Image: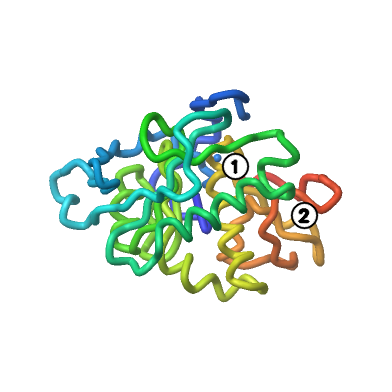
Amino acid sequence: MSAQGARRRLRPERGRKGLFVAVVVPAALICAAAVVGPRWSTDAEGKTAAPSASGTSSDIGTFTVARAGASDTGKGNAYRVEVEDGSGVDPDRAAAEIARILAAPRGWSHHGEHTFRQVTHGPAGLVIRIATPRTTDAICGRGGLDTHGEVNCRVGADVMVNLKRWQQGSPEFHGPLADYRALIINHEVGHWLGHGHETCPGKGRPAPAMMQQIYGLKGCVSNPWPYDAKGHYLGGPSVP
């Protein structure tokens, strides 16, 4: 789940999901939810709005699609970045930071193993949204996830980044905010790619990116990346 780990109301499923892939078929928050997230419509000004749902529409804001750096043609896993209106986060600046994380050699791109391409329109198998805690809770809740106003989640194609975590980081993470943002994206996109939660592999070792580091490091040291500088996967025992 997320940021990383929303507490599941239902027992998590551990299977991999099918992905929209332009070139590579990749092997994504743990307990990768086998739930299809809500579909959103985009207007000509790049605004998105959630479809109304009984009892939840008033809890969900509207979003602006990031445009800078996007290309609606090309190769790679198509993804879109959206930021909730009124959050105070600039969509294009956030998208630039997310693009750097996705392209980093220590991230899931891993020297070309996975490729990502930001889009504004058309099909996007991955949608990364930065949203207020209230909106995050509402959308994650549709997938059976309880983010309790604090953490992130992944529901189907949608990665929900809790604004509180994006702006404040985590008291359990020792490092700059930019690194914690990398952890958020790497953890949730890791779920999208089919990875489940992992735990600390040993005292003093780097915490896996797929570990729910917000709930404690269990003797490991903070780490936002799935790979080390030599390209070795920084994993740990799987969490049932």
In the image, taking residue 111 as reference, residue 194 lies left or right, namely: left
Looking at this view, name the residue that lies furthest to the left: 54
The answer to whether one can see residue 178 in this image is: yes
User: Which of the two residues, 68 or 210, is positioned nearer the viewer here?
Assistant: 68
Counting from the top left corner in percent of width and height, residue 12 is at 48, 41
Image coordinates for residue 142, horizontal then vertical, percent: 30, 44
Quarter of the image for residue 182 reads: bottom right
50 lies left or right of 67:
left
Residue 213 sits above or below residue 145 on the image? below
| Spot occupied by residue 65 in the image (x, y as percentages of width and height) | 35, 48
Residue 217: quarter of image: bottom right
Q: Nearer the viewer, residue 6 or 79?
A: 79
Upstream in sequence: badge 2 or badge 1: 1
The disc labelled 2 sits on which kind of residue? Pro
The answer for how far apart the CA atoms under marks 2 and 1 are is 15 Å
Residue drawn 65% across the image and 46% down it: 103
Q: Position of residue 38 (x, y in %)?
A: 30, 39
Element carrying mark 2: loop
**What residue is at 67 percent from the left and 72 percent from the top?**
175
Residue picked out by circle 2: 201
Q: Quadrant of the C terminus?
A: top right
Q: According to the image, what is the colour scheme of the structure?
A: rainbow
Q: Are marks 2 and 1 in contact (CB under 8 Å)?
A: no
Q: Residue at x 44, y 38 (%)?
A: 119
In the rendered structure, which amino acid carries the disc numbered 1?
Answer: Gly
Q: Please indicate whether residue 94 sits to the left or right of residue 100 in the image.
A: left
Q: Residues within 10 Å of mark 2 (few under 14, many from 20)?
A: some
Report whether residue 236 is seen: no
Residue drawn where x is 44% and y is 56% of the image: 92
The residue that label 1 is drawn on is: 196
